[in-house]
């Protein structure tokens, strides 16, 4: 009985000493489709801006580094899109559909560490000019390549 208790205690201690993983397991190199929600910067509520982004995002992992690509609807209204994680660039535009694809670095897909994004919305016909900070909360991941 003492042997069993000693082994159980050793097992529990070993588990306690293993560092906890943050969020999802590290993804291998490849391309993934990842669902996401655009959240308000404060709290856990979905942003009104959520409907202006096509889901899912495409996440590319190369040498352990993640890059996201998302499509913005009403591109003419959303003048600025800048993830605080860096690597921001416009990959393509479709003026006819009023969309653009943006790319940026992602440091984590953990819902506990959402990616912060700064945006600027300008709708002259409605005299609407506002800047927002939002969070991208990533969800389920599906490998495509």
Image (cartoon, rainbow, N blue to C red):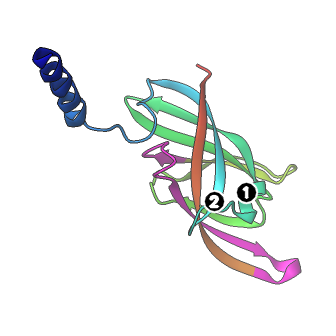
Q: On screen, 2 above or below 134?
A: above
- The residue that label 2 is drawn on is 39
Q: Using a 10 Å C-alpha cutoff, classify the residue at mark 2 as few (fewer than 14 neighbours), some (14 to 19) or many (20 or more).
A: many
Q: Secondary structure at mark 2?
A: strand
Q: Measure the C-alpha gap from mark 1 to mark 2.
A: 7 Å
Q: Nearer the viewer, residue 76 or 2?
A: 2
Query: Circle 1 is placed at which residue position?
Result: 50
Q: Is residue 133 left or right of residue 108?
A: right
Q: Which one is nearer the viewer's eye here, 4 or 41? A: 4
Q: Is residue 55 left or right of residue 103?
A: right
Residue at coordinates 52% horizontally, 53% vertically from top-left? 88
For the point 23% across and 36% down, the residue is: 16
Quadrant where the N terminus lies? top left
Q: Are marks 1 and 2 in contact (CB under 8 Å)?
A: yes
Q: Position of residue 119 (x, y in %)?
A: 62, 67
Give the extent of the magenta segment: 104-128
10 Å neighbourhood of mark 1: few (<14), some, or many (≥20)?
some
């Amino acid at each position: 009985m003492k042997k069993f208790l000693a082994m159980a205690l050793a097992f529990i201690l070993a588990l306690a000493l293993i560092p906890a993983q943050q969020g999802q397991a590290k993804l291998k190199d490849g391309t993934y489709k990842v669902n996401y929600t655009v959240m308000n910067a404060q709290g856990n509520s979905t942003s009104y801006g959520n409907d202006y982004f096509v889901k899912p995002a495409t996440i590319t992992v190369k040498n352990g580094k993640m890059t996201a690509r998302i499509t913005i609807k009403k591109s003419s209204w959303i003048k600025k899109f800048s993830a605080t994680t860096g690597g921001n660039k416009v990959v393509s535009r479709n003026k006819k559909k009023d969309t653009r694809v943006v790319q940026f670095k992602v440091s984590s897909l953990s819902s506990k560490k959402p990616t912060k994004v700064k945006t600027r919305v300008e709708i002259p016909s409605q005299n609407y000019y506002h800047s927002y900070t939002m969070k991208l909360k990533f969800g389920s991941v599906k490998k495509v390549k």
